[in-house]
Amino acid sequence: MDAIQKSLLEQVAGLHQVPEGAYNIRANGQKAGRNTTANIDIVTKTDKDGIDIHIRPGTKNESVHIPVVLSMSGLKDMVYNDFFIGEDSDVTIIAGCGIHNCGVQNSEHSGIHTFHVGKNARVRYVERHYGEGDGSGENIMNPTTIVEMEEGGYMEMETTQIKGVDSTVRTTTARLGPRATLIIKEKVMTHGKQLAKSDFTVDLDGEGCHTNVISRSVARDQSRQIFLARINGNAACYGHSECDAIIMDEGVVSAIPEVTANCLDAQLVHEAAIGKIAGEQLTKLMTLGLTEKEAEEQIVNGFLK
C-alpha cells in the first residue's frame, strides 16, 4: 500500500501498522491484506464482490478489522459483507471507508453489511467515514447495515462521519428477537454543500427487546442533513430515538422520528432538538481568551465527543 492509502487507514480504522487478529483490508476494489485466526475465518464470496466473516460460538475478546480505502478518482466500489456471529461470543468489529480524490470524477463506495447475531452474543461495531483530496470530483459513500438479532443478543453500533464526504445515504434496518438489545450512536458533521441522510428502521419483534437510536450532528455552511428514525414495537418492548443537532451558517437539519406501537405493551419514545450554539456558551469561552471561532470549535468538538 502507498502512503496515501496508509494515511486513510489511520483515519478510518486507527491503524498505524498491520493489526493483530483477524483483518481484511480492501484498497481500490481489491484485497490488500487478510489474516484469519482459530476463531475467526474470512472467506471471499464466490457469487458477488465481498466476504463472509464467521465467528465461532464462544469467541471472547477478539477483534476484526475490515477497512476500505479508495485513492483512484472515478472508482465506484460495491461490496457485500456478511457477519455470522456465533452464540455466546463477545467481539469488536472495526470497519470504515476512506476516500482520497484529487481528480474530476466522482469516487464512490457502497457497502452492504449484514450481521447475523447469535443467541446471547455481544458485538461492538465501529464504522468511520472520511474523505479528502483537492479535486473537483465528489466523495460519495452509501453504507447499508442489516441486523438480525437472536434471543439475548447485544449489539452496539458507533458510526462517525466528520469530514470530506460530499454525499451519503446511511441506511440501517434491524430485527430484534426476545431480550435482544441494539444501541446505535451516530455522529455526523457536514460542511460546504454536502448532503447526509440517515435512515433507520428497527423492528422490535421479540418480547423484552430494546433499542436506543441516538444521533448527534453539526451542519455548517450550506450543508443539509436528514435524520429518519422508524421504530416499530411489535411486542412488549422498549424503543427510544433521539436527534440532537447544531446548525451553523446556512446549514439545514430535518429530524423525522416515527414510532409505531403494534402491541399494547410496547413503550416507545422519540426526541429531537435542533438549534444554533447558545450565545452564553460563546460568551463564557470568549471571556477565557478564546476568539469566537475558537469558542465555536470547542463547543462543536465537545458536542460530538
Image (cartoon, helix red, strand yellow):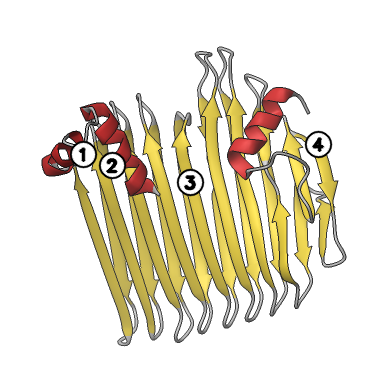
Query: Is residue 77 in sight in this rendering?
Result: no
Query: Is residue 291 in sight in this rendering?
Result: yes
- SS class, disc 2: helix
Pointer 2 residue: 299
Q: Residue at x 76, y 56 (%)?
A: 52
Q: Looking at the image, which residue sits at the far right?
A: 38
- SS class, disc 3: strand
Q: State the CA–CA distance, disc 1 to disc 4.
A: 46 Å
Q: State the CA–CA distance, disc 1 to disc 3.
A: 26 Å
Chain-order first, disc 2 or disc 1:
1
- SS class, disc 4: strand
Pointer 1 residue: 285
Which picture quadrant has residue 200?
bottom left
Taking the image as shown, residue 26 lies to the left or right of residue 265, namely right
Q: Are marks 2 and 1 in contact (CB under 8 Å)?
A: yes
**Of circles 2 and 4, which is in front?**
2
Residue in the foreground of this view, choosing between 6 and 57: 6
Picture disc at residue 32: 4
